[in-house]
Amino acid sequence: MEAITPVVSFAGAFSLGIIFAVLGAVKLRLADILQVNDAQYGRLISTLMFASLIAVLIIGPLQDAIGYMPIGLVGFVAGGVCLWLLAGAKTYGIALVACALLGIGAMCVNTIGNTLGPAVLFEGENPALAQNLINAFFGLGGFLTPIFIGKFADKLGYQKTVSVIGAVVFALVILVFLADFPEAPGDFELVASLGLLGTGAVIFGGLSLFCYIGLEASMAGFVSTYLKDLRAYG
């Protein structure tokens, strides 16, 4: 159904917001379960981000080759399953694996969200406006996740709360089966893409994202620790 297709894009951005927010939101509880210090927990966040860095370089061209639907399927399924794995993690090694695989799921939902939306929203004629609308759903996922965890973690426990969040991401895969996807562009050229790395606009945009997404996602992982320490010493 064509009406569902833009919703898949929104769901992808929403899921990415959830994934990027969850490690920061559960930091105190998960660190206690795994019995790890701040440096070790930081490696979990870095593992998620490094896996995302590698995955996005592959998933973008892959989507051009195989289409939107397979990427959406992998993204929502992997995102949900990895959140379940993180919810049940009792050892640091399992948590590391969960974060690494979660990075793959994150970049799948990110790719389908950021590329499908501009192609189908506003008849594909206003990609900037479409991207802003999509980013609102990313923010919504990042906004609601800590609130949900804060409200229900004490009542349901860490494992059940994160499992519910994983179920939400997993359930969004239903939209993929209902959507009517357009054909992927299929015109990715590696040499041309590498050539863009030398242009000023791309460099400036990359630095902006470096200071924005990178700092946002990593700092969120330690805000809870900072506030806890501030309360202890205040």
Image (spheres, rainbow, N blue to C red):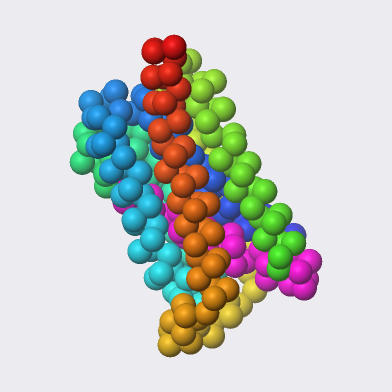
Name the image quarter holding the N terminus. Answer: bottom right
Name the image quarter holding the C terminus. Answer: top left
Please report the bounds of the magenta region as a residue range: 98-126
Query: 209 or 160: nearer the eye?
Result: 209
Query: 97 or 177: nearer the eye?
Result: 97
| Coordinates of residue 102 in the picture (x, y in percent) | 38, 50
Inspect this view and state whether residue 132 appears: yes
Question: Looking at the image, is 10 positioned above or below residue 18?
Answer: below
| Coordinates of residue 214 in the picture (x, y in percent) | 45, 51
Q: Is residue 82 magenta?
A: no
Question: Looking at the image, is 133 positioned above or below residue 89?
Answer: below
Q: Is residue 112 magenta?
A: yes
Question: Looking at the image, is 120 positioned above or below residue 89?
Answer: below
Residue drawn at point x = 59 percent, y = 67 percent: 115
Inspect this view and state whether residue 89 appears: no
| Coordinates of residue 110 in the picture (x, y in percent) | 52, 58
Residue drawn at point x = 36 percent, y = 24 percent: 29
Prevailing secondary structure class for the magenta stretch in the rendered image: helix
